[in-house]
Image (tube, helix red, strand yellow):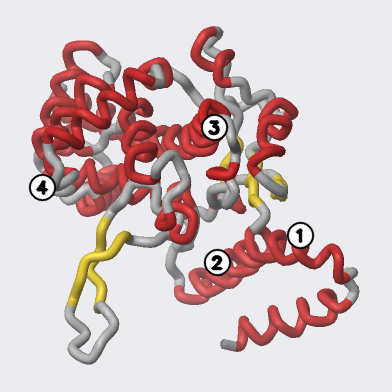
Amino acid sequence: MAGAGVVAAVVAPLWNWVPAEERGLARRTLIYLVLPLVLFALAWTLSLSLGSRSPFATRDSVPLSLLAADVLAVEGAATLPQVFAANGFDLLAVVERNAPVPRLYFAFLPPDLAALPDEDARKAIFLQVALPLILLVNDSILTERDRLRRLAAILDAGGTLEPRELTWLDGLARRYEGDSARLDNLLLRVDAVPPSLALAQAAVESGWGTSNPALEGNALFGQMTLSLAPGRLRRPAYVVRAFAQLYDSVRAYVENLDTHPAYAEFRRQRGEMRLAEGGLDGDRLAPALLAYSERGEAYVADLRLAIRANGLTRFDGVRLGTATPARLLVPGR
């Protein structure tokens, strides 16, 4: 509470100097850049005082505002084609010329996306919003997978692991709900989700970014959670899980496929595809997600239609760029 008082004491006088017409942008900057930095500093100081490592020591847990070089406020969906062009994000160049995907990370969806009259334009914007976040999550998991494979190779060759590697391995196994003594099984869990499949599920579950759960709760993948329904009896009910930002939704979705028992067959088929081909094909893996929806086969058919009709398999081999700084985009609300 003392830390909150310090923040308020510093911010309140500065806020009075901001012209009223500029306070919308100032508020978004405060929420998505300044406040996470302050919280990060407070958490870091606390961790040092307790003699422990920072809770933000891993890349996955760092808020996007700390990964981004700056925050860019965008006023509406109609302006996004110009924003993407100014930052070198061209979907055709990505799929046809293997151009890298710029690190443009949206905090949340443009609220007026459904108002765009051109369906193709709406879909393109949705793909440009979702794709960098999916690649970001996949990259962090593939980094862990590469390290896990190196440790497995050492053990297969009869070597031993250092204490720090054993500690890391135990932590990885706990996060992925696997067994640190069975690295072959753990490798089935620590892996990416093909972008084509993730994009298709996000499109189907969120209505291409126009559903209320997606707009109000950053829920791209329709994940459910148990909640108490209002009323005298307060009976438990399942509702769509809400997230603070879109990134949190993507991360939770991939972790769900990588850990939940319902998706063991998906992980098995993905592992076989890795061994046989190296890469992953979302269209061929989609039938392994029968358990994702009560609609079963009809749901899988919708996923495959979304993949094929929109050419989403073209995104399965794309990569994030590193030549330009990452930016956090905050649409106006």
Residue at image coords 20%, 38% = 189
Residue that label 3 marks:
128
Decide: few, some or many residues near mark 4? Use Cα within 10 Å; few <14, some 14-19, many ≥20. Answer: few
Question: Helix, strand or loop at disc 1?
Answer: helix
Question: Helix, strand or loop at disc 4?
Answer: helix
In terms of image quadrants, where is residue 227? Answer: bottom left
Q: Is residue 112 above or below residue 184?
A: below
**Amino acid type, mark 3:** Gln
Q: Is residue 133 left or right of residue 145?
A: right
State how far apart marks 3 and 1 are (Cα). Answer: 23 Å
Q: Look at the image and tell me whether residue 77 can be seen.
A: yes
Residue at image coords 31%, 51% = 222
Residue that label 2 marks:
44
User: In the image, which is nearer the foreground, mark 1 or mark 2?
Assistant: 1
Decide: few, some or many residues near mark 2? Use Cα within 10 Å; few <14, some 14-19, many ≥20. Answer: some
Q: Is residue 181 left or right of residue 57?
A: left
State how far apart marks 4 and 3 are (Cα). Answer: 31 Å
* Labels 3 and 1: the sequence-earlier one: 1
Q: Is residue 57 above or below residue 320?
A: below
* Quadrant of the drawing holding the N terminus: bottom right
The x, y position of residue 47, in whole percent, is 49, 70
* Labels 4 and 2: the sequence-earlier one: 2
The x, y position of residue 293, in whole percent, is 18, 45
Residue that label 1 marks:
25
User: In the image, which is nearer the foreground, mark 1 or mark 4?
Assistant: 1
* Labels 1 and 4: the sequence-earlier one: 1
* Quadrant of the drawing holding the C terminus: bottom right
Residue that label 4 marks:
261
State how far apart marks 4 and 2 are (Cα). Answer: 35 Å
